[in-house]
Image (cartoon, helix red, strand yellow):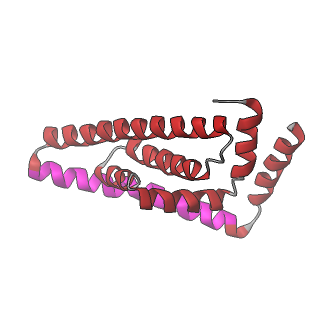
Amino acid sequence: MLILAIMSNIKLFFKFFEHAFITKLLLLALLYSLLPLFETFLLFYLGSILGNYFTLAMAASTGLLGILIALGGTRKNLTILKRKIKDGEYPGHEFVHLVGILIGGVLLLTPGFITDFLGLLLFIPVIQNALGKIFIKAAKIDLKELYEYLQLYEIY
């Protein structure tokens, strides 16, 4: 098991020498660095229209509300996932939805209205399912292996 973990880390290390991987990583970093600029512009714009304190209160409350929704969705999904693993069923659908919920939760934790909106969009099941599948495929996560691990060690 330790050898497999070391080998997967070596594969990740070698990816940093691939031109395509570095390009994708830099574009993702650029996108993530431009997002706060748009968020700041939107906060200043709404602050000039609605008032600074009201805008900050709205930003904080939407983030808090989103986190509560994410926690509820995660708790519900984990309960179903644990039950299916205990019954010996493969919870592939729940794995995909859990990934979508976690990505939505990260977006909701990032302060601002744009990220809150994108995070809340991820709680629409169709979008959540599509993004979860895309992320799992891009990250090359083997869900069958994860399922066998959870079954073997009864981590539920």
- Residue 19 in the image: x percent, y percent? 71, 69
Horizontal arrangement in the rendering, residue 75 relative to residue 43 (left or right) = right
- Residue 56 in the image: x percent, y percent? 21, 40
Query: Which secondary structure type mostly characterizes the magenta part of the structure?
Result: helix
Instruction: Inspect the magenta stretch and tell me whether residue 140 lies in it.
Output: no
- Residue 51 in the image: x percent, y percent? 11, 44
Horizontal arrangement in the rendering, residue 53 relative to residue 36 (left or right) = left
Up-down relation of residue 140 to residue 9 (above or below): below
74 or 33: which is nearer to us? 74
Residue 64 position by quadrant: top left
Segment colored magenta? 21-49
Is residue 2 in sight in this rendering?
yes
User: Which residue is depicted at the point 77% across and 34% down?
Assistant: 152
User: Which residue is depicted at the point 39% across and 56% down?
Assistant: 35
144 or 8: which is nearer to us? 144
User: Which residue is depicted at the point 37% across and 52% down?
Assistant: 36
Up-down relation of residue 132 to residue 83 (above or below): below
Instruction: Inspect the magenta stretch and tell me whether residue 48 lies in it.
Output: yes
